[in-house]
Image (spheres, rainbow, N blue to C red):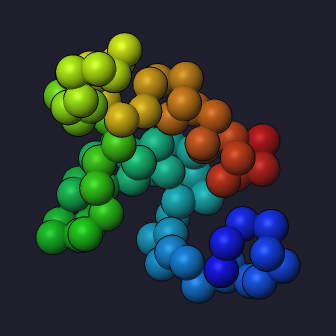
Amino acid sequence: GELGSGRSHRYQAPPLPSGTSDPGRLRLWIVAPEVIAPGTRMPAFYAPGQRTNPEDPRFGEPLLSPSEVEALIALLTGN
C-alpha cells in the first residue's frame, strides 16, 4: 500500500540479517552487504559513482552520504 493509506507495510522488505542489531554490523550491511551475505540481492548504498544523473548535485557520489548512513542506523536501531 501507499504511505499514509493505513495499510500495513510489514512485508515490504525482507528482514534484516541476524546480528544487525549491532550498529557496526548494521553499518556494514548498509555499506557492503556482500561482506555479510555473499550473493545477496541487497544493494550497497555507499559506493562511489552510484548517482549517475548529471543533473544531480551529488553526481558521482554514493546513494547515501555518511551522515545519511548514520541517520539510517539510528532509525533502525532506535537510537
Residue 59 vs 5, above or below: the answer is above
Residue 48 visible in this rendered orientation of the protein: no
Report which quarter residue 11 is drawn in.
bottom right
Question: Where does the N terminus fall, quadrant-wise?
Answer: bottom right
Quadrant of the rendered image containing residue 4: bottom right
Question: Front-most of 77 and 11?
Answer: 11
The answer to which of 12 and 70 lies nearer the viewer is 12
Where's residue 74, x and y in %?
69, 41
Q: Position of residue 33 (x, y in %)?
A: 30, 55
Front residue (pair 33, 46): 46
Outermost residue to the top: 57
Q: What residue is drawn where x is 46% and y is 43%? A: 27
Residue at 54% from the left image edge and 30% from the top image edge: 68
Relative vertical location of residue 17 with respect to residue 56 in this rendering, above or below? below
- Residue 24's x, y, as percent? 50, 42
- Of all residues, the one furthest to the front in this rendering is 55
The quadrant of the rendering that contains the C terminus is top right
Q: Is residue 54 above or below residue 21?
A: above
Q: Is residue 45 left or right of residue 50?
A: right
Q: Is residue 27 left or right of residue 3?
A: left
Q: Is residue 30 left or right of 61 when viewed as pictured?
A: right
Residue 22 visible? The answer is: yes
In this rendering, the count of numbered labels is 0
Q: Quadrant of residue 31?
A: top left
Seen at 53% across and 60% down, the residue is 20
